[in-house]
Amino acid sequence: MQVAVSMHSVKAGIAIVALPLVMLGASSVSIGLRPILPAGIQRAAALVVSVVGVVWAALFWVIASIFDFEGWNAINGVGSVIALIWLMMLGRTMQSGTIGSHNNTSVNA
């Protein structure tokens, strides 16, 4: 029983520290990629992913510090699906060769 309690405490500690940092990292990547993305859905999706990541991380730390909320599994799933869809769109755009400053008129050389 003591091992199970210890493992649950370690899992909760890793979740409280690591998951928000991963979301903040994804937000940073989407903000960094935004200037080289083609105008339209890609830039809008990058903005949505960055805002969702920052808000999610802040809410996670606030709620996790107050009480142990098990509903975060559902919220994590929704956030993950949003990020996954954007990453799939980004990968498709990268394979087509339309991402880069060579085709972006808003980037001043």
Image: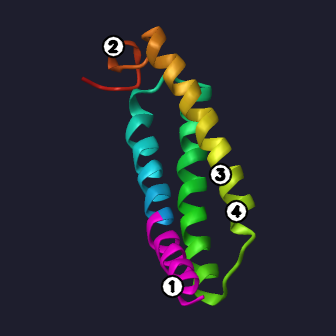
User: What numbered label is drawn on residue 6?
Assistant: 1
Q: Nearer the viewer, mark 1 or mark 2?
A: 1
Give the mark nearest the N terminus, 2 or 3: 3
Residue at 62% across, 72% down: 59
**As drawn, 45 above or below 100:** below
Residue 105: % across, % down:
40, 18
Horizontal side of residue 95 vs 83, given as left or right: left
Residue 21: % across, % down:
43, 63
**As drawn, 105 above or below 25:** above
User: What numbered label is drawn on residue 79?
Assistant: 3
Cα–Cα span, label 1 and label 4: 20 Å
Residue at image mark 2: 102
Q: Read off the magenta span.
A: 1-18
User: What numbered label is drawn on residue 73?
Assistant: 4
Label 4 SS: helix
Residue 26: % across, % down:
46, 49
Give the mark nearest the N terminus, 1 or 2: 1
Per the picture, the main secondary structure of the magenta-coloured stretch is helix
Quadrant, the C terminus? top left
